[in-house]
Every structure is written in C-alpha cells, then in structure tokens.
Image (tube, helix red, strand yellow):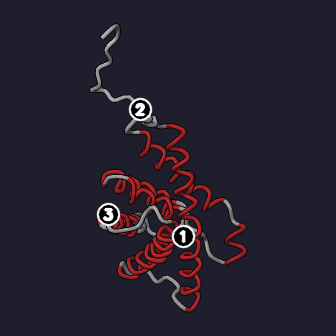
C-alpha cells in the first residue's frame, strides 16, 4: 500500500501532461498553455518524501519537454527546485488551509515557468521575452492558485478510496479486565 500513493501521483502527472497538450480551448482563450503539472507537484511536495518528489519532477519534466519546444530536461530542474523548497518548509506552511494552498499554487505557478525561462536563457536559447511574458506568468499563477486546491481534493478523495482508513477507537479500553460471574 505504500507504493500506491506515488503510483497515483505518477499516473496523474502523466495524465496531466497529456491533458495540457491535448486540450487547447484554454490556450485559445487566454493565449497561454495552462500547466497542470505544477498543482500536482505542490501536493506531492507537501505530502510525499524526497524520492517521490524527485521521481515526479524527472518524469513530469521529461514528459512535458518531449511534447513541447523546450530543450529536453529543462523543466526537470525548476520542478525539482520548487518541490524541494516546498518540502523543506512544509512544516511551517499552513497546508491544511485552502487559502495557503492557493498562495502556494500561485507562487509555484509563477516560479516554475520563470525558472524554466532563466534556465533556457542561460543555455543560449533565445525565447521570446516581453510584456506577453508577464501575462503568461500571471495566467499561470492564477491557474496554479485555482487548480492546487482542486488537486488536493482529488488526491484526498483517491486516498480515501484506495487506502485503508484507521478504525475508530471504541469506548472500551484494552487494559480493562471484565470479570464475569458472581462477585
């Protein structure tokens, strides 16, 4: 049962990469390709271990780069960095609060594309940078803020469906002895 949670995260990441490349009505509406990977990355960083975060960053980044014009592997580093930063400070974050989840989704939605852009520029690529870049970062941040609480709900529902739930304790204590018969 311990491998079920990372497997669900990996399957969701694969499905998110497929959806964000296949569904184009949001891209046609806003002019920006909405990244669904970032919301699942926030959830994984706040609920999983380092191995799971690293595996999801590598697989999700490579899958995303294979379907985009990005150089191969350029998205892995920003996903890994944001995942490690969120994991490092997860005890200090109010991860149970919906508002905090929205703020984390917004920050991750801006940080991952910005780090990807900086990494591509440092590699010698010449991406288009201008006022439209600010619009892109704003839309991705808002999309991350909207999608992250939804991703938390989906994964909590999946966790309830597929993992064993602890039994509630009864009113009888284990250390109490019941004497039967006459006293």
Q: Select label 2 or label 1 by which is in front.
A: 2
Q: Which residue is mark 1?
A: 144
Q: Earlier in the sequence, mark 2 or mark 1?
A: 1
Spatial CA span between label 3 and label 2: 33 Å
Q: For the residue labelled by badge 1, is the local secondary structure a helix, a strand or a loop? A: helix
Spatial CA span between label 2 and label 1: 44 Å
Q: Select label 3 or label 2 by which is in front.
A: 2
**x and y percentages locating residue 160 in the rendered image:** 52, 42
Disc marking residue 171: 2
User: Residue at point 43% right, 76% down?
Assistant: 111
User: Residue at point 62% right, 75% down?
Assistant: 32
Q: Select label 3 or label 1 by which is in front.
A: 3
| In-front residue for pair 51/152 | 152
- Tell me if mark 2 has few (under 14), some (14-19) or many (20+) residues whose alpha carbon lies within 10 angstroms of its own: few
| Quadrant (top left/top right/bottom left/bottom right) for the N terminus | top left
Q: Earlier in the sequence, mark 3 or mark 2?
A: 3
Proximity of marks 2 and 1: CB atoms separated by less than 8 Å: no
- The quarter of the displayed image where residue 90 is located: bottom left
The vertical placement of 4 against 80, above or below, is above
User: Residue at point 27% right, 26% down?
Assistant: 175
Spatial CA span between label 3 and label 1: 21 Å
For residue 7, side relative to residue 140 (left or right): left
**x and y percentages locating residue 181 in the rendered image:** 35, 7
Residue occupying the far top of the picture: 181
User: Residue at point 32% right, 68% down?
Assistant: 92
| In-front residue for pair 145/119 | 145
Q: Which residue is mark 3?
A: 91
**x and y percentages locating residue 95 in the rendered image:** 43, 63
């Amino acid at each position: 049962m311990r491998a079920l949670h990372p497997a669900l995260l990996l399957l969701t990441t694969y499905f998110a990469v497929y959806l964000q490349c296949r569904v184009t009505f949001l891209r046609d509406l806003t002019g920006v390709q909405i990244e669904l990977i970032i919301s699942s990355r926030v959830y994984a960083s706040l609920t999983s271990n380092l191995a799971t975060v690293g595996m999801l960053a590598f697989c999700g980044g490579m899958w995303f780069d294979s379907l985009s014009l990005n150089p191969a592997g350029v998205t892995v580093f920003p996903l890994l960095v944001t995942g490690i930063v969120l994991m490092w400070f997860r005890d200090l974050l109010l991860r149970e609060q919906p508002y905090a989840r929205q703020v984390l989704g917004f920050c991750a939605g801006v940080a991952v594309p910005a780090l990807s852009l900086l990494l591509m520029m440092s590699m010698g690529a010449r991406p288009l940078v201008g006022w439209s870049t600010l619009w892109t970062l704003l839309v991705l941040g808002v999309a991350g803020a909207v999608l992250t609480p939804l991703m938390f709900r989906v994964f909590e529902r999946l966790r309830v469906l597929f993992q064993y739930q602890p039994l509630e304790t009864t009113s009888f204590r284990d250390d109490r002895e019941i004497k039967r018969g006459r006293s």
